[in-house]
Image (spheres, coloured by chain):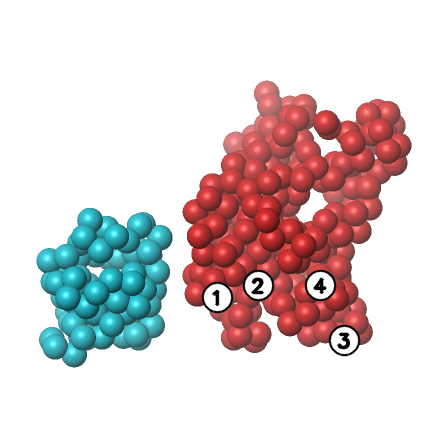
Chain colours: A red, B cyan
Amino acid sequence: MKLERKIALVTGASRGIGREIALGLAKQGADVVVNYSGSEDRANQVVAEIKELGRNAIAVQCDVSNSESVANMVKATIDTFGKLDILVNNAGITKDNLLMRMKEEEWDDVININLKGVFLCTKAVTRQMMKQRSGRIINISSIVGVSGNPGQANYVAAKSGVIGLTKTTAKELSSRGITVNAIAPGFITTDMTDKLTEDVKDQMLKQIPLARFGEPEDIANVVVFLASEDSKYMTGQTLHVDGGMLM
Amino acid sequence: MADVLERVTKIIVDRLGVEESEVKLEASFKDDLGADSLDVVELVMELEDEFDMEISDDDAEKIATVGDAVNYIQAKQ
């Protein structure tokens, strides 16, 4: 196992990609803090599954766009496990609309969760990781943060911002043994993408050289790599995990 | 005073790898003791632990010299 005795905090881990990341880290030996915003039952379910794997886990409710809430979550992590080795900034929402129709509120909500949330969680764990002289921060961006996507001005701006934040954080913390990398998933089958129409899905499939949509596990595998010693000479990078959609 | 200065000096010597004789009250962390911005952040973190206090970001930004740190801690104690 690649992550024995490691402690991981995964935001937005009650479902979708986050859930699979939490399980993937646990399968490699990590104990996991399962953060959720609203889905308490599903978060508890993830905790139960991790415990079945023989690892420890707790569910912590937290709004990642609220600094006080984030500070409490990190405190709960340290109080329970005594340290923190891996942060996965995964929590995210979509509120799609054409730019001309996008409400200011839709813009703010997505930026607050998807971009400010990454800033707040990163800031909150940095103190602990600097003391430990080691740490892994993995930010879940999106392929549309690189390519752009009509109808997603807010989401794309946030996900693109995450890539810039990843590079800057990587440069600031590299001297303290902390690496920071991003993953840009392509089309991954989750609740979030189930909302798309069949037409849109067919269109997207034509653009994917590997000719299938990704599974949450495809992202979790890369998170495990970035969280492990195997990636120790990488920082500030954005890995595209998209079946070749964007090259 | 002596006690605070002694404890602060020890932390600075450990963290920045400077000689004890260089740690004067007027010495600037960045200009005289070779600290970069991140070193200063870490120093403040260690001072918080050593003296069991919280130093706000606003206050931390004002701590530039050894004397600033010592005075701040004494005023808070």
Is residue A105 among what the camera can see? no
Nearer to us of marks 4 and 3 is: 4
Three-letter amino acid code of the residue under disc 2? Asp
Between the residue at mark 3 and the residue at mark 2, the CA separation in whole angstroms equals 19 Å
Q: Which mark is residue A85?
A: 2
Q: Is A9 on the left or on the right of B7, as rendered? A: right
For marks 1 and 4, the one nearer the N-term is: 4
Say whether mark 4 and mark 2 are on the same chain.
yes
Question: For the residues carrying marks 2 and 4, which lies nearer the camera in this image?
Answer: 4
Residue B63's x, y, as percent? 21, 56
Same chain, labels 4 and 3: yes
Residue type, label 1: Gln
* A3 lies above or below A236: below
- Residue bearing the label numbered 4: A2
Q: Nearer the viewer, residue A126 or B43?
A: B43
Residue B45, image x and y in percent? 34, 64
Give the image location of residue A118, x and y in percent. Answer: 53, 48
Write down the residue under mark 1. A132
> Where the N terminus of chain A falls, by quadrant?
bottom right
Is disc 1 placed on a helix, strand or loop? helix
Name which residue lies at 64% across and 45% down: A140
Residue reaching furthest to the bottom: B3
Q: CA distance from mark 4 to mark 3?
A: 15 Å
Distance in Å between CA atoms under marks 3 and 1: 25 Å
Asked if disc 2 and disc 1 are in contact, CB closer than 8 Å, the reply is yes
